[in-house]
Image: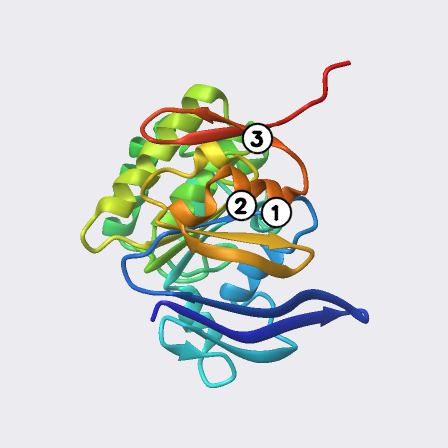
Amino acid sequence: MILNFENVSLVKNNKKLLDQIDWQIAPHEHWGILGLNGAGKSMLLQMVTGQVWPSSGNLTVLGEKFGQTSIPSLQKRIGWVSNALQQKLHQFDTVESIVLSGKFASIGVYEKTTREDLEKAAEILEVLGIAEIQKRPYEMLSQGQRQLVLVARAMMSDPEVLILDEPCNSLDLFAREELLQIFKNLANQENGPTLIYVTHHVEELLPVFSHVMLLKAGRVIRQGSRKEILNRQTLETFYGKGVHFIPYLQERLAIIPELKAE
């Protein structure tokens, strides 16, 4: 089992942010998570990475049970792309340094790096189309470039799980499709990472995402196969409003609200 939540809840300041989450990810599954603002999506992912611990219940990630394992060691096996991480980075560090830090799951590089590490970081930046910014300070980058650097950092450790918390934010249409193609290629690798992808945009959930979770107000409303979840009846029940489905590229779907004519 890649991941196992058993009746997991999270309470902060007397407020229940996640409520009795039961969720399992088996090998060769890739998951998408949909939910409106405030649903608890990012908090759920921070729990997977060990940034936040459950208030109750049991959580096991990559065979390691929280409370019985080394979280720093586990974090080196997980790639993480999130705006929450972006805010923690040292803004004056170079792109190269930030990408290298992904090998150690650290903020900043405090361990010795090798020539092979430098070559690997350069190769990843080349694949992502941002090789020319390798020596630039992070604070000098556009928001779209910063997002791509986070992806490069996450890929540096050859992660077993790759968590993607709205990774296409701030990317233009063309950059978004290029990045989604990279995720597709990763998902199709024989020994590639398990992908967990959070988004508001259904069209970003490529066909490689075999399963989908619907999260609302800290609770799992529905979860299951792509076919079970990505249909009009299920999503209208979830959102509590009418939606229109629009066929998109490569067996993808987009949805827009069903608005009443004035």
Rendered view: 81 above or below 157: above
The front one of 53 and 145 is: 53
Element carrying mark 1: helix
At a point 67% along the width and 37% down the height, the residue shown is 241
Q: Residue furthest front?
A: 233
Instruction: Identify which amino acid the numbered label 3 is placed on.
Output: Gln
Residue 245, given in percent of the width and then of the height, sits at 50, 28
Give the residue type that dot 2 points to.
Answer: Thr
Which residue is identified by label 1?
238
42 vs 127, left or right, is right
Measured as percent of width and height from the top left, residue 231 is found at: 47, 40
Q: Nearer the viewer, mark 1 or mark 3?
A: 1
Which quadrant does the N terminus fall into? bottom left
Tag on residue 143? 3
The number of callouts visible is 3
SS label for mark 3: helix
Q: CA distance from mark 1 to mark 3?
A: 31 Å
How packed is label 2: few (under 14 Cα within 10 Å), some, or many (20 or more)? some
Q: Quadrant of residue 11?
A: bottom right
Q: Secondary structure at mark 2?
A: helix
> What crowding class fits label 1: few (fewer than 14 Cα within 10 Å), some (14-19), or many (20 or more)?
some
- Residue located farthest toward the bottom when viewing the structure as drawn: 68
Residue at 55% x, 52% y is: 214
Q: Is residue 210 left or right of residue 139?
A: left
Mark 1 vs mark 3: which is more N-terminal?
Answer: 3
In the picture as drawn, the residue positioned furthest to the top comes out as: 262
Q: Which residue is mark 2?
A: 234
Q: What distance separates the C-alpha of mark 1 from that of mark 2?
A: 6 Å
Q: CA distance from mark 3 to mark 2?
A: 34 Å
User: How dense is the environment of label 3, judged by Cα within 10 Å: few (below 14), some, or many (20 and up)?
Assistant: some
Q: Is residue 92 visible?
A: no
